[in-house]
């Protein structure tokens, strides 16, 4: 793996998910990097054909870096529920359909947990996983992963965040990610942890 430094200047945020783009922009702000969204450059969203978070993050970062001629940062992430053998996992966005309906996706998680008999505490363990890939136009690419452990709560609670945040309670807390202030989620989230590793490798 060739690790390279990210110099101050523009970087493409290779995501069309406004919730993720907002969180990534907040993480990048202190480092003199000027995020440019893939949507504002009119870049197409590549098909996520990888079998892992890491593979999908890499293919998105590489496609944007090549198309824009700039370094690009991509996030592939999702919710992995233990009693569902890691589902929805890399299919987390797909469970919400098109256009995204996360109320329906969260209801499906709960329905499948009930079907699996996972009604209490430890039966309902889950984690969010995030792979962050940085790619440069000439082909170098590095990837960092972060996770946060917790459990699934029903019914959903809270209005902050996005996606599955209203049903995820991180370990050590009694509030869902959607009930926390955004800054509190950013302290412990899978994305923030992956970003910390990226900072150590590419920004220090
Ligand atoms: P993708 O990485 O674009 O394939 O989509 C990841 C999906 O995982 C998102 O659309 C959300 O549904 C879910 N997800 C990833 N990170 C978070 C998070 O921080 N909170 C809630 N849901 C998330």
Image (cartoon, rainbow, N blue to C red):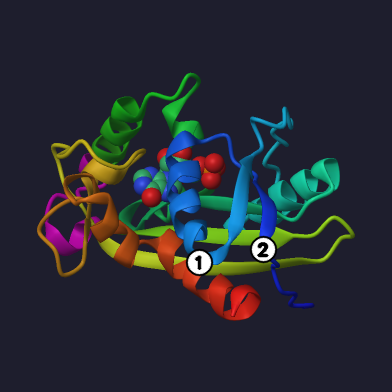
Give the x, y percent position of residue 91: 51, 41
**Quadrant of residue 45 within the rendered picture:** top right
Q: Which residue is mark 1?
A: 195
Q: Residue at x 66, y 37 (%)?
A: 38
Q: Residues within 10 Å of mark 2 (few under 14, many from 20)?
A: few
Q: Secondary structure at mark 1?
A: helix
Look at the image and say whether residue 121 sits in the magenta stretch.
yes
Q: Quadrant of residue 128?
A: bottom left
Q: Residues within 10 Å of mark 1 (few under 14, many from 20)?
A: many
- Note whether 63 is above or below 8 in the view shown: above
Q: Total label count? A: 2
Give the magenta range: 113-124
Q: In which image quadrant can residue 157 be found?
A: top left
- Please tell me whether mark 2 sits on a helix, a strand or a loop: loop
Residue ID for mark 2: 8
Q: How far from the left and from the top, in percent, is residue 60?
A: 70, 47
Q: Quadrant of the N terminus?
A: bottom right
State left or right for residue 55 relative to residue 149.
Answer: right
Distance Cα–Cα, label 1 vs label 2: 16 Å
Closest to the observer: 148 or 159? 159
201 lies left or right of 122: right
Whether residue 196 is visible? yes
Q: Is residue 125 visible?
A: no
């Amino acid at each position: 793996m060739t690790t390279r430094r990210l110099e101050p200047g523009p970087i493409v945020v290779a995501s069309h998910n406004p919730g993720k783009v907002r969180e990534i922009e907040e993480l990048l702000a202190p480092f003199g990097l000027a995020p440019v969204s893939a949507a504002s450059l009119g870049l197409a969203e590549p098909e996520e054909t990888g079998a892992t978070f890491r593979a999908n993050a890499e293919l998105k970062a590489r496609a944007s870096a090549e198309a824009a001629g700039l370094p690009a940062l991509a996030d592939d992430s999702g919710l992995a529920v233990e009693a569902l053998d890691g589902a929805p996992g890399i299919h987390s966005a797909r469970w919400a359909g098109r256009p995204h309906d996360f109320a329906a996706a969260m209801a499906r998680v709960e329905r499948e947990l009930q079907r699996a008999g996972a009604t209490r505490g430890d039966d309902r363990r889950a984690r969010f996983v995030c792979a962050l890939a940085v790619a440069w136009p000439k082909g170098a690419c590095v990837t960092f992963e972060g996770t946060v452990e917790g459990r699934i709560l029903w019914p959903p609670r809270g209005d902050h965040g996005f996606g599955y945040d209203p049903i995820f309670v991180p370990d050590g807390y009694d509030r869902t990610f959607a009930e926390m202030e955004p800054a509190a989620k950013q302290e412990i989230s899978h994305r923030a942890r992956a970003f910390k590793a990226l900072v150590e490798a590419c920004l220090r």
